[in-house]
Image: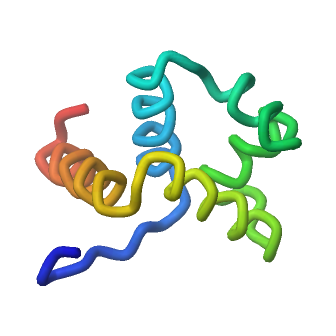
Amino acid sequence: MTDNPITLQPGPVFYEVFLGALMIYGTNLKEWAALHGYDANNAKMAAVGAWNGPKAKELRQKMIDRVGEDTFRHLYQLRMAQEERGAA
């Protein structure tokens, strides 16, 4: 892990990082969610933080695990830096 770990928070950036990773792996949210027994809409709601109970937290961890925690953190940090600069 990094020396200065960032806190991964649900929201648009979390969702975009996960979607981007899925595209790299040649899949999409609907396929990934179905494979893991979730509805894609619920998966999106968990990723953006609209659904934030224990099951949502568990689902977000599965998303992070799919990408790999270090990779997810790195991509999240890069994307957050873009947000801070005002570039999407």
Query: Is the image coloured rainbow, by chain, by secondary structure, or in one colour?
Result: rainbow
Q: Is residue 65 above or below residue 38?
A: below
Q: How many marks?
A: 0
**Residue 6 horizontal side relative to residue 9, left or right:** left
Where, quadrant-wise, is the C terminus in this rendering?
top left
Horizontally, residue 62 falls left or right of residue 56, namely left
| Residue 86 x/y as whole percent | 18, 41
Measured as percent of width and height from the top left, residue 39 is found at 86, 36
In the orientation shown, which residue stands out farthest toward the top?
Answer: 26
Q: Quadrant of the N terminus?
A: bottom left
Instruction: Depth check: give the residue in front, 19 or 62.
Output: 62
For this orientation, the residue located farthest to the bottom is: 3
State the image coordinates of residue 2 (x, y, percent, origin top left): 16, 75
**Towards the viewer: 36 or 29:** 36
In this rendering, would 16 be left or right of 29? left
Q: Residue at x 60, y 64 (%)?
A: 61
Residue under the image location 80 percent in, 73 percent down: 53
- Residue at image location 48% in from the left, 41% down from the top: 18
Taking the spot 63% from the left edge, 57% from the top edge, the residue there is 62
Q: Is residue 6 above or below residue 22?
A: below
Q: Is residue 85 left or right of residue 24?
A: left
Q: Is residue 88 above or below residue 63?
A: above
Q: Residue 27 appears at what percent x and percent y? A: 57, 19
- Between 5 and 67, the one lying in front of the other is 67
